[in-house]
Amino acid sequence: MTGFYTLFYKEILRFWRVAFQTVAAPVLTALLYLLIFAHVLEAHVEPYPGVRYTVFLIPGLMMMSMLQNAFANSSSSLIQSKITGNIVYVLLPPISHFEFFAAYTLAGAARGIVVGLGVLLATLFFAVPPFAYPAWVLVFAILGCSLMAMLGLIAGIWAEKFDQLAAFQNFLIMPLTFLSGVFYSIHSLPPFWQAVSHLNPVFYMIDGFRYGFFGVADVSPWQSLAVVGFTLAILTVITLTLIKSGYKIRR
């Protein structure tokens, strides 16, 4: 597993050396969302009985930031290596496709979790959310970040230039995260849009994560866990298949 540890360490250093850009900037963005939405809607919206809108918003912003940054870490690393040509230094050593997959996925998940912790610490000045079930918080944080890191790997493998990667992020990742209940409970939506929201796997990540804080959710946390786990399994198979085949990496 020497190859895995080395590649994982390299990916961790890659985002940590520029933490002001990769960690501090997303935390600031989430904080701005909190300030704006809480200021406008705090007095008008009570998502759950007895839960202030500011408190409700914090877990959603945490998870949104975690997912977006987990995706960005693996996708940007891979596309940069492909474009600059230094991916050959990863392919030449005897690193198995599973080690390659695990190193990029876990590094992306690590960045997502670090950003999530940063968002939590920054928002504590405005509200302190309860931790009804910390185990659920941890489970959905790990699964969600791992899933999006895998999706970032798929995007990085498929894309051949930064424009394609930006399109993947702007037309898939951003809509999925923004339309997943980050800023609202789906019970406030009309029936049609509630049904559409149930087709979005990111909704289950955020809803299950939020359940860990409040003990209340729009759907059962076990249902959310099943959907996220099933999606994770599918993406694992797809990502490992692409890496093993060398699609757009060795060709």
Image (spheres, rainbow, N blue to C red):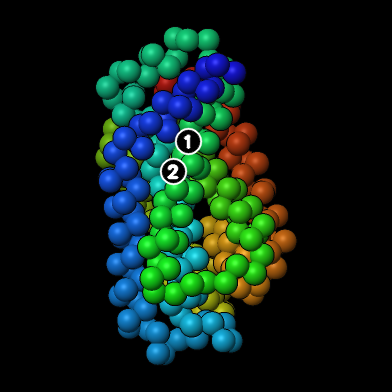
Amino acid residing under circle 1: Ala
Question: Which residue corresponds to mark 1?
Answer: 107
- The percent position of residue 214, horizontal first and vertical second, equals 61, 73
Q: Residue at x 32, y 18 (%)?
A: 86
Front in this rendered view, residue 177 or 39:
39
Quadrant the N terminus occupies: top right
Above or below: residue 81 compared with residue 227:
above
Q: Residue at x 58, y 48 (%)?
A: 142
Q: Residues within 10 Å of mark 2 (few under 14, many from 20)?
A: many
- Determine whether, in the image, residue 131 is placed left or right of residue 37: right
Amino acid residing under circle 2: Arg
Per the image, label 2 sits on a secondary structure element best described as helix
- The percent position of residue 226, horizontal first and vertical second, equals 70, 55
Question: Which residue corresponds to mark 2?
Answer: 111
Quadrant the C terminus occupies: top left
- Determine whether, in the image, residue 22 is placed left or right of residue 176: left
Q: Residues within 10 Å of mark 1 (few under 14, many from 20)?
A: many
Q: Residue at x 70, y 68 (%)?
A: 220
Q: CA distance from mark 2 to mark 1?
A: 6 Å
Residues at discs 2 and 1 in contact (Cβ within 8 Å): yes
